[in-house]
Structures are given as structure tokens and as C-alpha cells.
Amino acid sequence: MRDRAGSFIRQREDYVAFIPNTLPPEPPLNIDVEMIDLLSQADRSLGRLDGITQILPNPDLFVAMYVKKEAVLSSQIEGTQASLIDVLDVDETKDKSKEKPIEEVVNYVKAMNHGLIRLEELPICLRLIKEIHQVLLQGVRGGERDPGEFRRSQNWIGPVGCTLAKATFVPPPVPEMIKAMNELEKFIHDKELRIPDLIKIGLIHAQFETIHPFLDGNGRVGRLLITFWLCYKEILSKPLLYLSYYFKKNRTEYYDRLMDIRLKGDWESWIRFFLKGIAQVSDESIITAKKILKLKEEHSQLINSQTRNPSNGLKLLERLFEQPIVTINMVADMVGISYPTANNLVTEFTESGLMRQIDQNQRNKRFSYYNYVQLLQEGTELI
């Protein structure tokens, strides 16, 4: 069982690299009673999550905010120092040193959206994976490390400054990496294998992280693949499930489970961990969606009873679900009203508790749709 996932092979340059076996695992995955139960829970939770998109007043706005949250969380796992508030913040005078981390998160959003659009024309394939990587690293940290191209040199994983010889894990050398990626693409599209879709994407994600085909950005691309798969297989009609929060919260176990695949051939423990994450995150997303629905209903009633022009107030409320941190100029543009009217509307929202001023500036004041931001930012605080 030790060589079930692959073998550690000493290279001529005197380092040991891991050469993965092709999928599916051999001997076959032991889908026992516990795994069947976890798979059933994950399927049910995903079904409920997909169903809630049918009752959201504007699911695309909800999805847009969730994509931003996922972008922040996935980037934080890789060390990016940006919070959800940083990404939503519109203040033009904010600390310029934060711009690069924020651009990394923005690129993640672009990569997600690019991939979802391309899935209408392409299946999940190596070409799409390279395209996603190019968007992800364009003009940011790692942008000099061949965006959109598989690596042409050996990479490794370990503490900052460690050498190849002392790395925690060394992925396959370039020739074996290219072969492994080609085999992974075949596995993705093999329709004869009778493997449940959620288990299959768990295998795909782990194998991708083991192959580590890029010089940078492998973790983020690997997590994007999970969402792309769920949409590609029409398990979700909207991209509403993101595991980065679960992986961040259980960071040590996440990496340990992946290493146990390589060291012990223990695919089963990884799949159980993965399925638990799908069920848990789906249930949390459902709770959040219901809270947002309740928030919108309560705040709509408040606007109808406490604003002089409820029509403008409801228009602003709708837009705040997409952009919850605003200036008065932004409100004027969002609603299509004059600056004085926008100023009065923001004052009404602030006095009724719908919005809060988040700085002390006298000019270009920024306001937050506070309760909504509080719901969304859970887990995105910087470590």
C-alpha cells in the first residue's frame, strides 16, 4: 500500500522526487459504509445549496460576493495579506503597500470568471488549466514565473529558504510531470470509470497538488478546479461552493492528508476529509444565504417605512449586495441620482442603522453596509 499513490525516486542530482501513479488508485478505493454516508451527506447538502439559488432575489449578486470571499481565502492560504474588507474598500487614499496583495485577489476573481465562461466552450483540460494560471498570475507576485506554462524546471515544497535537498516534498521532475498531467487529463474525461463525481474531484485535486505542474499558483489553481468541476458536471448551477475556508480552518490536517497519500497510499482518509468539507461548507453557505435573505427582507421593510423615497432606497439596497462599501459619489452613480440626493439617502441609511461610516474623512467619506459585510467576512480575517 505504501507505493499505492506513487514512488519516491532518487534523481541523478541526488535529491528524492515523488513520481505519482496514474489514477484511479490501485488497489481500488475502499468505499466503505462511512465513506458512503459522507458521500450521501455531501450530495444532500450540495443539492440544498443549489436549490437555495432558486429563491435568492438576485443570485448573481450573491455569487459575485461569494467569489470575492473565496478569492480572499484561497489567496490567504498562499500567504497573501489581504482581507475581504481590503478588497471591498474603495478609498483612493488607502495604503499603497496593500495594492499588490489586493491585485492578487482580484486576479483570482478574474481567473474564476474566465474559467466559468470558458467552460461553456471547453471541457476541463490542460489548455483551460494553463489559461486560468495565466490570468491568475498576470502582473502580480509570481508573474515572472511563466504564467500559463507548465514548469520547465524542478520545484519543491518546504519552509522559506529551504534547499531542494531539504524540501518537505519534491514533485515529479519535468518529464514525469508532463506525463502525469496528460494522464490526469485522461482520467478527468474517462467516462467508463464508475466513480462518484464528488469522489472523483477529490482524487483530481489531490493528484494535481502532488504533480504541482506550475512554478507558482498550484494551490489556487487546484482549488479553482473543484468549483469548475462542480459546475462542469452540473452539480451546481451557480459557483457557490468554495472549500478554501474549510482548508484554511483545517490547514494542518489538509496538508497531512495530502502527504499521507504520498507516504502511505492513504487515499481513503483524504477522501473522507474532503467529503466532510463539502457537506460542512455547503451547510454553512445555506445558513449564510438564509441570513442574507432575512436581512434583505427586514431592510426592505425598513426602507419602505423610514425613507422619503423608498424607490431610490430599494435600488441602493440591491446594489449594496454587490458593492457593500461605497462613497456618496458611488451611490449617486449606482442609483442614478444627484450628489445632494445621494447624500440625503446615505444619511437616511446611516440614521436607520443600515449603513455605517467607516472612516473619519470629511471628504470622500466611505460607508459600509455593515450587517451584510459582517455576515460575509467570517473567516477572512488575516492570520
Image (cartoon, grey):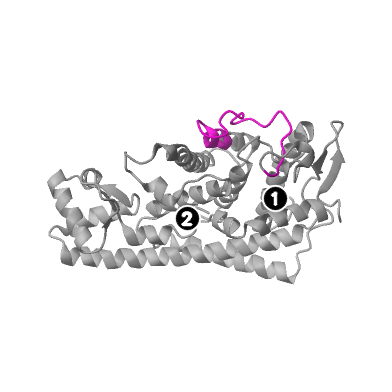
Q: Is residue 264 visible?
A: yes
Q: Are marks 2 and 1 in contact (CB under 8 Å)?
A: no
Which residues fall within the magenta stretch? Answer: 132-159
Horizontal placement of 247 versus 314: left or right? right
* Location of residue 165 in the rendering, given as x and y in whole percent from the top left corner: 79, 38
| SS class, disc 1 | helix
Judging by the rendered image, the residue that carries numbered circle 1 is 206
Q: Is residue 46 visible?
A: no
Residue 322 or 173: which is nearer the viewer?
173
Badge 1, how many Cα within 10 Å: few under 14, some, many 20+?
Answer: many
Q: Please rate how many residues cluster around mark 2, counting C-alpha atoms within 10 Å: few if below 14, some from 14 to 19, many from 20.
A: some
- Compared with residue 80, is residue 145 higher up or lower down, i.e. above or below? above
The residue at the point 22 percent across, 66 percent down is 302
Amino acid type at mark 2: Glu
Circle 1: residue type: Ala
Q: CA distance from mark 2 to mark 1?
A: 26 Å
Q: Nearer the viewer, mark 2 or mark 1?
A: 2
The image's mark for residue 381 is: 2
